[in-house]
């Protein structure tokens, strides 16, 4: 009885594998790797790709600046002035918050090649809404960093914090540029509605 059961399982697995092999050979709408051959999606992706790449590079620079800032923070762990450590740690949290928001926006935009062309407009519209929110939150992070910077007295930390703030400003500029492109794409692809 056991051998018959094993034989049936092997036959079923074999059929599933054959079905998967044959359906995997069926023609699809994808060619040239992951690029889709759709209607209006390719021009949108082509317009946004350089900015998305710049956002990744700018985020990577911010991530490295955050790591450098955290390295400086470690030097204050046993400092008798625990207020300085508290200010530095709080500034680090706002830096991390901005970096996470920027990274998340990049992750959402980096998958444009995989969005079906008929869904691209909706995807970009949703991303534009989220991008507006992220830019506003990053502006708040910048303001809080400015506030905490006034209380930090150690020169190396102040210099690193200035470098971080410049990197955040650069990232926010790239996000704003992408947002403007998203809004212009959404304006050109949105059909007029009749009320």
Image: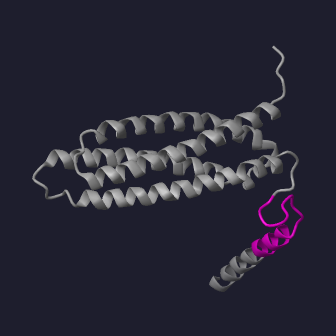
The part of the chain drawn in magenta is: 15-35
Instruction: Give 190 or 135, whichever is nearer the viewer.
Output: 135
Picture mark count: 0
Does residue 23 show up magenta in the picture?
yes
Q: Residue furthest left?
A: 80
Q: Is residue 161 left or right of residue 7?
A: left
- Quadrant location of the C terminus? top right
- Residue at 72%, 48% in the rendered image: 48
Q: Is residue 147 left or right of residue 25?
A: left
Looking at the rendering, which quadrant does residue 2 occupy?
bottom right
Looking at the rendering, which quadrant does residue 91 occupy?
top left
**In this rendering, does residue 85 appear at all?**
yes
- Quadrant location of the N terminus? bottom right
Asked which colour scheme the image uses, the reply is: one colour
Where 154 sits versus 191, above or below?
below
Instruction: Give 191 or 66, whichever is nearer the viewer.
Output: 66
From the top left corner, tell me how far across and down residue 192 is, in percent.
84, 23
- Residue at 49%, 43% in the rendered image: 169
From the top left corner, tell me how far across and down residue 74 is, in percent.
24, 60
- Residue at 71%, 80% in the rendered image: 10
């Amino acid at each position: 009885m056991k051998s018959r059961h094993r034989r049936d399982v092997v036959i079923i697995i074999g059929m599933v594998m054959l079905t998967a092999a044959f359906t995997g050979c069926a023609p699809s709408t994808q060619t040239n790797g992951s690029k889709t051959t759709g209607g209006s999606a390719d021009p949108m992706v082509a317009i946004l790709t350089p900015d998305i790449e710049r956002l990744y590079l700018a985020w990577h620079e911010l991530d490295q600046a955050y790591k450098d800032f955290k390295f400086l923070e470690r030097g204050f762990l046993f400092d008798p002035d625990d207020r300085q450590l508290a200010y530095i740690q709080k500034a680090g949290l706002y830096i991390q918050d901005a970096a996470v928001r920027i990274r998340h926006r990049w992750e959402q935009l980096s998958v444009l090649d995989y969005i079906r062309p008929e869904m691209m407009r909706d995807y970009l519209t949703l991303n534009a809404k989220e991008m507006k929110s992220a830019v506003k939150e990053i502006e708040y992070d910048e303001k809080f960093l400015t506030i905490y910077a006034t209380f930090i007295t150690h020169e190396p930390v102040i210099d690193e914090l200035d470098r971080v703030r410049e990197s955040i400003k650069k990232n926010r500029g790239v996000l704003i540029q992408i947002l403007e492109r998203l809004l212009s794409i959404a304006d050109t692809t949105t059909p007029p509605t009749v009320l």
